[in-house]
Structures are given as structure tokens and as C-alpha cells.
Image (cartoon, helix red, strand yellow):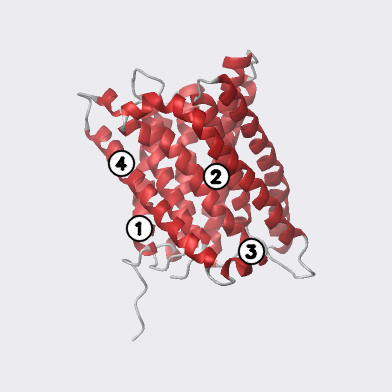
């Protein structure tokens, strides 16, 4: 299979799947420290807990395996004669270059969550290690700024070339949201006030830049869809669901930064945290229903087919976003067994979909060769 940076979506989806059980246990299981660890489950292994831990373990290992594998492929591709240059020059394709940033941003969250869960000693050292982690995080932030400007030029100045953009065009917004979430996690975990302050500033910048781009691109895509009215090609339809994980990333980033401003600066803007979680959760549900109705034939006839295309990973990311927003809403605003049950069901569905898409991705499930 020819390499494209979009292959990093496999690692992103695996990381998201690993986070789902962690977030559920972190907020609904009793534990001693700031982060739940495997020691907190001593003597409490029922079927549900075993399932959650198994999903988290397999997905965490798979995430790091895919990150290493895709990074090696990316380096070889980048050094191939002219391949990367041609890719970056194409305004219809080059948004895919943000996929590695999204996946690496997810790695930060996996380290701060599932990895810390399985290694309690490491969990205790997280606040100290975060102090060193602010440096690579700052480099990731600067790299994203450079990429956004460089790639953005090709979208604005196309030498008269007509380009039809689709919802994959929001991958840079996805990257900004992921970097914002990673920064908010660093901010909340840090014990050094200088590190926390630096993390909060970079996070606020990431949120502001990401939402600004999101607003412009989102309006452009909606107006273009309403104006032209034509349905996208089958492989592009799942890309519409990228809106949901983007909403989740910004909602949780804002929620965490609001918590930091209240705890450290004494500024209470709880209403903003409420709006970021509940309103974006409601909008995500609306978008899911809208897309499910609009693309019902795709789900029925196209998705079960053995053909793989990168946008299918978005179905896993949708469930990750919904589950996280459901847990935050349940814990902080509207305690409901419905939201809790939905979270468990989301993990089951996400695991099943990931397995199916992954088997297509690696070629175990593949189209029959014509005789």
C-alpha cells in the first residue's frame, strides 16, 4: 500500500480507543490519587472491569506499535525523491500532513492516561516529568504553527486552480484541538507553576487559533454544501464525522483550562466550562443524527464492504468524542445511568468498529480478486 500521512489515523484511533476506558474509570471508579491506577482495582475485577482494562491494554500497545511503524514509513517517504514535495504542493491532498501531529498529540494523552494507569510508579512521577515534557510540547506547537502557515498558503493561493474541499480539510483544526488537549493535560498535571503557566498560555493559543480556523472553514464547507448540494464520493462521506471529535477536543480543553484558572488564579468562569461541554455535546449529537440519516445508505451498503479508505477511522473517533463528552456531562452536570450506559456501549462499538477497520487496513479482510 502506497504511503500517505493519513495512515497515522490508525494510531490516532487506537489511542482514542485506549482513552475511552481510562476516562470512564477515572471519573466513575473510586481511587486514591489524582489519576486512577491499576492498584486501585485490587479485589474489584468484575466482567465490566476486566473488559475495560483489556481494551485499554490492547489499544495502548497497538497505539505505540503503530506510531513507531508509521513514523518509520513517514521518514522513508519524506526522503523519497520528490514524493513529499508533490504531496505538499497539492491543496486537495496536503491537509493529510496534519495527521502525524494529531497522532503524536494523542500519544501525549495516552502517556498521561493509560500508560500512567498501568505503571503506578510512573503515575507518581508524572507531575515531575511534565516539567520536562513542556519542551517537546512547545516544539510540537511551533511545528504546527509552521505547518499551518505553509500549507495554508497553498489553499489561499492556488494559481487559479479550482479545488473542491471536503471535511478532511478540517484535519488541521483536529491537530490544533489535539495539541490544545495535550497542553491542558500538561497544565493540570504540572506541579511547577512556571510549567503550568507556560502550558496554559500555549493551550489558550491553540484553542484560539483552532477555533478561529474552525469557524472559517466550517462556514465555508457548510455554505459550499448548501450551494452545490451534491453528495461527496463514497470514500469521503465518513469524513463528515470529524466534527464530533473536534468538538470533544475543544470542549475538554476549555473545561480543563477553566479548572486551572479557578484553582490557580481564583477566576471562576464555570459557565464557560458548562457551555463547552454540554452545548458541544448537544451539537455533536445533532450532527451525528444528521449525518446518520444523510448517509444511511453508506452505512448499510458501503461500510460492510472489504474496501478500506482512511476516512473510516473517523467512525472510531466519533465514538471516542461522544463517550468522553458523555462522561464529563454525567459527572459534572447531569448524572444519568443513561449517559453511563451509553459510555460502556460506545466502548464496545468502538472496539468492534476498530477491529473491523484494522483488519481491512492490514489486508486480512480485502476485496476478492477478479478471476
Marks 4/1: CA–CA distance: 18 Å
Residue ranking furthest to the left: 43
Q: Can residue 337 be seen at all in this image of the molecule?
A: yes
The residue that label 3 is drawn on is: 88
The residue indicated by pointer 4 is: 57
Q: Which of the pair 100/156 is nearer the observer?
A: 100
Q: Nearer the viewer, mark 2 or mark 4?
A: 4
Q: Position of residue 89 (x, y in %)?
A: 67, 66
What is the distance, in whole Å, between disc 1 and disc 3 at their CAs? 31 Å
Residue ID for mark 1: 356
| Foreground: disc 3 or disc 4 | 3
Percent from the top left, x then y, of residue 304? 39, 63
Q: Earlier in the sequence, mark 2 or mark 3?
A: 3
Precedes in sequence: disc 4 or disc 1: 4
Could you tell me which quadrant the C terminus lies in? bottom left
Q: Nearer the viewer, mark 4 or mark 1?
A: 4
Amino acid at each position: 500500500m502506497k504511503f500517505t500521512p493519513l495512515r497515522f489515523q490508525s494510531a490516532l484511533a487506537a489511542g482514542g480507543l485506549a482513552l475511552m476506558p481510562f476516562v470512564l474509570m477515572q471519573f466513575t471508579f473510586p481511587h486514591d490519587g489524582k489519576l486512577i491506577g491499576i492498584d486501585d482495582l485490587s479485589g474489584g475485577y468484575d466482567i465490566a472491569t476486566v473488559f475495560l482494562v483489556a481494551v485499554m491494554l490492547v489499544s495502548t500497545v497497538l497505539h505505540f506499535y503503530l506510531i513507531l511503524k508509521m513514523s518509520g514509513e513517514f521518514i522513508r517517504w519524506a526522503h523519497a525523491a520528490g514524493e513529499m514535495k508533490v504531496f505538499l504542493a497539492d491543496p486537495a491532498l496536503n491537509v493529510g500532513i496534519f495527521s502525524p501531529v494529531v497522532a503524536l498529540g494523542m500519544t501525549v494523552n495516552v502517556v498521561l492516561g493509560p500508560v500512567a494507569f498501568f505503571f503506578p510508579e510512573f503515575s507518581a512521577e508524572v507531575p515531575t516529568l511534565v516539567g520536562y515534557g513542556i519542551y517537546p510540547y512547545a516544539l510540537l506547537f511551533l511545528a504546527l504553527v509552521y505547518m499551518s502557515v505553509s500549507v495554508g498558503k497553498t489553499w489561499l493561493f492556488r494559481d487559479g486552480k479550482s479545488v473542491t474541499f471536503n471535511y478532511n480539510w478540517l484535519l488541521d483544526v483536529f491537530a490544533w484541538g489535539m495539541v490544545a488537549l495535550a497542553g491542558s493535560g500538561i497544565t493540570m498535571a504540572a506541579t511547577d507553576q512556571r510549567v503550568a503557566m507556560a502550558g496554559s498560555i500555549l493551550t489558550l493559543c491553540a484553542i484560539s487559533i483552532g477555533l478561529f480556523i474552525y469557524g472559517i472553514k466550517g462556514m465555508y464547507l457548510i455554505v459550499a454544501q448548501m450551494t452545490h448540494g451534491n453528495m461527496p464520493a463514497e470514500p469521503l462521506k465518513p469524513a463528515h464525522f470529524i466534527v464530533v471529535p473536534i468538538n470533544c477536543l475543544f470542549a475538554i480543553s476549555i473545561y480543563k483550562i477553566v479548572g486551572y484558572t479557578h484553582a490557580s488564579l481564583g477566576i471562576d468562569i464555570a459557565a464557560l466550562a458548562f457551555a463547552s461541554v454540554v452545548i458541544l455535546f448537544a451539537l455533536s449529537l445533532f450532527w451525528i443524527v444528521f449525518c446518520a440519516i444523510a448517509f444511511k445508505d453508506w452505512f448499510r451498503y458501503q461500510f460492510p464492504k472489504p474496501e478500506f479508505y482512511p476516512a473510516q477511522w473517523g467512525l472510531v473517533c466519533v465514538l471516542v468524542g461522544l463517550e468522553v463528552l458523555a462522561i464529563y456531562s454525567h459527572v459534572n452536570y447531569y448524572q444519568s445511568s443513561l449517559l453511563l450506559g451509553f459510555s460502556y456501549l460506545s466502548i464496545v462499538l468502538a472496539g468492534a468498529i476498530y477491529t473491523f477497520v484494522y483488519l481491512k487496513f492490514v489486508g486480512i479482510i480485502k476485496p476478492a480478486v477478479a478471476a
